[in-house]
Image: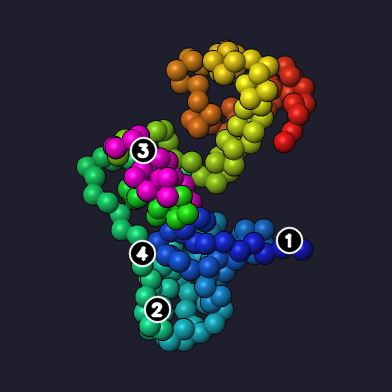
Amino acid sequence: MSKPMKGAAGQMGLGSFGDGNVVLLDGGMRLRLDDRVDFWPGTQTWKTVIDGPEGPADGSSLASLLDYLKRTREAQGRPVSAPLARRSDRVVICDYCGRHAALYGGLDVYPDRKDLAERQFWVCWGCDAWVGCKKNSDEPFGELADEALRAARVAAHRAFDPIWEQELMSKLEAYEWLALTLNMPREECRIGLLKLEDCSRVNQAVWERFGALALD
Ligand SMILES: [Zn+2]
């Protein structure tokens, strides 16, 4: 049996759920929110495990779930502080669901990252996907990334960075080699912009060229 993981809602792509707690069940297929509602992200359905003020409830969209939690919290006298989407004329589409993404402040996405407070993010909460914007702008760096892609990029950095950290190449040379290996222009070659399949190519290529680099 997989151990339930606990986290803050904001870090799990449920930022509009505010400071509620989330427990991952069934390997993340089911999320238990606030100890009272189970949510299945795959189907976007939810169902209460503890009756709320209106008795048992269920629904079939993230929006209706967040509404329900908001009403319940308000009835309990502890209202949810939902982050507000910001105004922008830019249209950014979530690649995963095809719906419009909305613009949020950095702390709405990463509540513990004070260094991102000034940054903005395009977010699709339903897909647990987001992308950061360029400094002082609402222009996204690339396309929205979901949890799997974010994890793959972290893994690619972990494989690649030791090349220059351990001075097997200079940082510049390392990125030139990577661009050549991935067959992409040097100026587009940033791990934060890579697609899922390129991330695994990074791991493979580093392994083939350098073998197992010393792990921290
Ligand atoms: Zn989406």
In the drawing, what numbered circle is on residue 78? 2
Q: How far is the residue under mark 3 from the one under mark 2?
A: 32 Å
Name the element at disc 4.
loop
Q: Is mark 4 within 8 Å of ligand 1?
A: no
- Tell whether label 3 touches label 4 (CB within 8 Å): no
Q: Amino acid at mark 3?
A: Cys
Marks 2 and 3: in contact by CB < 8 Å? Answer: no
Among the two numbered marks 3 and 2 on one chain, the one whose residue lies closer to the N terminus: 2
Residue found at x 35% / y 60%? 83
Q: Position of residue 155 (x, y in %)?
A: 63, 36
Range shown magenta: 114-137
Against 86, is 34 above or below? Answer: below
Discs 1/2, front: 2
- From the image, tell me which residue sits under label 1: 2
Tell me the CA gap for discs 2 and 4. 12 Å
Query: Does label 4 or label 1 sit earlier along the sequence?
Result: 1
Q: Position of residue 71 (x, y in %)?
A: 37, 77
Which mark sits nearer the N-terminus, 3 or 1?
Answer: 1
Q: Is the residue marked 1 within 8 Å of ligand 1, measured from its CB? A: no
Q: Give the side of residue 20 with respect to residue 155, left or right.
A: left
Disc ID at residue 133? 3
Q: Give how far apart the Cα atoms at labels 4 and 3 are.
A: 21 Å
* Amino acid type, residue under disc 4 in the picture: Ala
Spatial distance from mark 3 to mark 1, Cα to Cα?
Answer: 35 Å
**Residues tagged 4 and 1 counted as in contact (Cβ below 8 A):** no
Question: Is 195 colored magenta in this rendering?
Answer: no
Q: Please provide percent x and percent y for residue 197.
A: 60, 30
Instruction: Please tell me how crowded label 4 is: few (under 14), some (14-19), or many (20+) other residues with Cα within 10 Å.
Output: some
Residue drawn at 59 percent across, 42 percent down: 151
| In the image, residue 147 above or below residue 48 | above
User: In this rendering, is residue 100 above or below 42?
Assistant: above
Label 1 to label 2: alpha-carbon separation? 32 Å
